[in-house]
Image (cartoon, coloured by chain):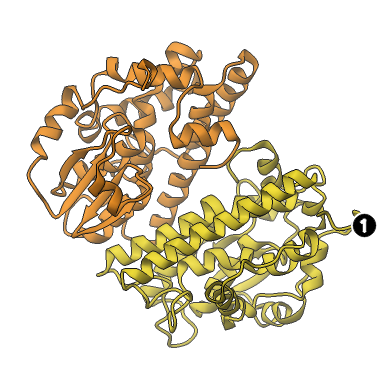
Chain colours: A orange, B yellow
């Protein structure tokens, strides 16, 4: 393992405090990588809803046997609930809705059409925003960077048109916000390296981004930024080896 | 290998066969309108859902590539399927087939707008969240792996890429089967046609149109043969012959004609085809 593969081994900052509070054995075990934005989605959901869980850090280079036994693909985020494993960040969020109906708030509204509306815009985040963020980070040529930045702004503006404020649905924090938040708190990487600014996407976007990053559940799952830098340096050089990075390079959906 | 030459056939604008009968039986105004394309697999899975859950709807054929104003009004990217809910003025609209199927399922299980007394559901009940998550995982696998692999295979032009595409599609099928087998091992056999006596599931509906097109379009244009294995072949058989699915199928020629443009990767065939060529996420 070269120096380039080093990842700081555990959460820091406010996230470290949250991790510490979640060490008691529970029915629900949450397998996480403190640095992973997909993990953060499901983590935010757990924290929002006050669902009891035990946090377990997964070292991507040294996955534990039990974890791989129940979850052969070894992906995070993953959960173990009453001995059964599940993964995929948004599927986990839907699972939490189904399995813990008594815990409030819910992340989806009650009415079927309103739920569809939330899922539609969650889908927009997953398909139009997140992959473009990743492509923008990993792009090496200035022409490509410019192209992806324009695509990124376009996708953000499309979403912002629908934002009621402070959150997507208005007062109610929902799955759309959760799907997006981890990339908001990482957008300083784009600002520092790819010429992005929140202002350029519009004042409504800036206000929405600030509302998301100051949400308590988002702050509680954030580590200190210095430790993210080592990881994102690899993405910025297009040398990252995560599943997402590999898929982007291969020109495949992920 | 590539089948012959591009004969310049175009996509059809009207269903044939059983699908025609079904579309004509659903020609009157209803609470829900389905904006459809007769050859489109994304439309088909919403259509199957409407049929299976016995929800009243009007089938409304549009030419999705002409992007008529009435389609753009209800579907921002001009994609089919889209549905409108006609009980409000203006009607509310939904697009994205996966979101629409989720909606129809939730509508049905809240016991409204069904034409007959049926308790069909594409999902295990709410008191079994893990079983539901497993079905979602299977569906996610279809959308993430199987569907892109289908198009990569069909759109590949040179022989090396076609061989690669064939392998990619076969691998994707294996991945889906692995998730079906996992459900089976863990005792979740009530939902999913993979299991003996299992009912049509959300995941089956997600996969069905492409499994069906594998048996005709991929077979014709790529010489594709279903992987060996009695279990797998029996599954595909159950899927394509499921009554709700069959009612939405046109005759083989419609699909062969409509997919020729994919098979020869004609420029700008569709947003899906463009995304595959560019290596980006499907719209």
Q: Residue furthest bottom?
A: B117
> Quadrant location of residue A198?
top left
x, y (%) of residue A29? 19, 48
Residue A9 lies left or right of residue A141; in this view the side is: left
Residue beneath the point at 28% across and 54% down: A70
Nearest to the observer: residue A105 or residue A192: A192
x, y (%) of residue A172? 28, 44
**Residue A127, above or below B89:** above
> Quadrant location of residue A40?
top left
Residue beneath the point at 49% across and 60% down: B176
Residue beneath the point at 43% across and 80% down: B198
**Residue A47, above or below B118:** above
**Residue B257, above or below B31:** above
Q: Residue furthest front?
A: A1
Residue B46 lies left or right of residue B12; in this view the side is: left
Callout 1 environment at 10 Å: few (<14), some (14 to 19), or many (20+)?
Answer: few
Q: Which residue is mark 1?
A: B7
């Amino acid at each position: 393992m070269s120096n380039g593969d080093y990842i700081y081994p555990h959460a820091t900052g406010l996230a470290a405090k949250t991790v510490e509070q979640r060490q008691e054995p529970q029915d629900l075990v949450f397998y996480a990588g403190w640095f992973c934005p997909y993990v953060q989605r499901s983590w935010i959901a757990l924290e929002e809803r006050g669902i009891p869980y035990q946090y377990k850090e997964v070292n991507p280079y040294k996955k534990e046997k039990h974890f791989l036994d129940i979850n052969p693909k070894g992906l995070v985020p993953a959960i173990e609930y009453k001995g059964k494993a599940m993964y995929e960040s948004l599927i986990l969020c839907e699972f939490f809705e189904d399995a813990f109906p008594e815990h409030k708030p819910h992340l989806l509204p009650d009415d079927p059409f309103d739920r569809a509306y939330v899922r539609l815009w969650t889908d927009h985040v997953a398909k139009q925003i997140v992959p473009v963020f990743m492509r923008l980070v990993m792009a090496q040529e200035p022409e490509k960077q410019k192209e992806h930045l324009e695509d990124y702004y376009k996708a953000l503006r499309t979403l912002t048109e629908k934002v009621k404020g402070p959150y997507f649905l208005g007062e109610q924090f929902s799955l759309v916000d959760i799907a997006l938040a981890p990339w908001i708190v990482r957008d300083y990487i784009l600002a520092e390296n790819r010429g992005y600014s929140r202002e350029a996407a519009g004042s409504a976007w800036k206000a929405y981004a600030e509302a998301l990053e100051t949400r308590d559940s988002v702050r509680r799952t954030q580590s200190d930024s210095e430790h993210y830098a080592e990881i994102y340096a690899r993405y910025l050089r297009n040398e990252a080896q995560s599943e997402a990075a590999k898929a982007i390079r291969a020109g495949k959906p992920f | 290998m590539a089948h012959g030459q591009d004969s310049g056939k175009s996509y059809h604008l009207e269903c044939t066969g059983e699908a025609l009968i079904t579309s004509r039986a659903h020609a009157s105004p209803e609470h829900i309108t389905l904006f459809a394309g007769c050859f489109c697999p994304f439309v088909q899975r919403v259509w199957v859902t409407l049929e299976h859950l016995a929800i009243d709807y009007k089938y409304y054929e549009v030419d999705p590539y002409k992007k008529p104003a009435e389609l753009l009004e209800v579907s921002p990217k001009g994609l089919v399927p889209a549905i409108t809910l006609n009980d409000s003025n203006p009607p509310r609209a939904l697009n994205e087939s996966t979101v629409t199927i989720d909606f129809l399922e939730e509508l049905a299980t809240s016991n409204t707008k069904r034409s007959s007394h049926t308790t069909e559901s594409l999902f295990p009940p709410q008191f079994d969240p893990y079983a539901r998550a497993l079905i979602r995982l299977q569906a996610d696998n279809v959308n993430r792996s199987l569907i892109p692999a289908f198009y990569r295979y069909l759109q590949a032009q040179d022989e090396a890429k076609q061989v690669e595409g064939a392998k990619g599609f076969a691998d994707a099928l294996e991945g889906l089967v692995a998730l079906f087998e996992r459900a089976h091992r863990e005792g979740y056999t009530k939902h999913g046609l993979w299991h003996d006596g299992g009912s049509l599931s959300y995941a089956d509906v997600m996969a069905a149109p492409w499994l069906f097109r594998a048996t005709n379009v991929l077979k014709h244009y790529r010489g594709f043969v279903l992987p060996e294995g009695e279990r797998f072949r029996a599954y595909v058989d159950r899927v394509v012959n499921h009554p709700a699915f069959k009612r939405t199928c046109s005759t083989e020629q419609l699909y062969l004609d409509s997919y020729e443009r994919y098979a020869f990767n004609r420029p700008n065939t569709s947003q899906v085809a463009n995304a595959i060529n560019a290596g980006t996420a499907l719209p």
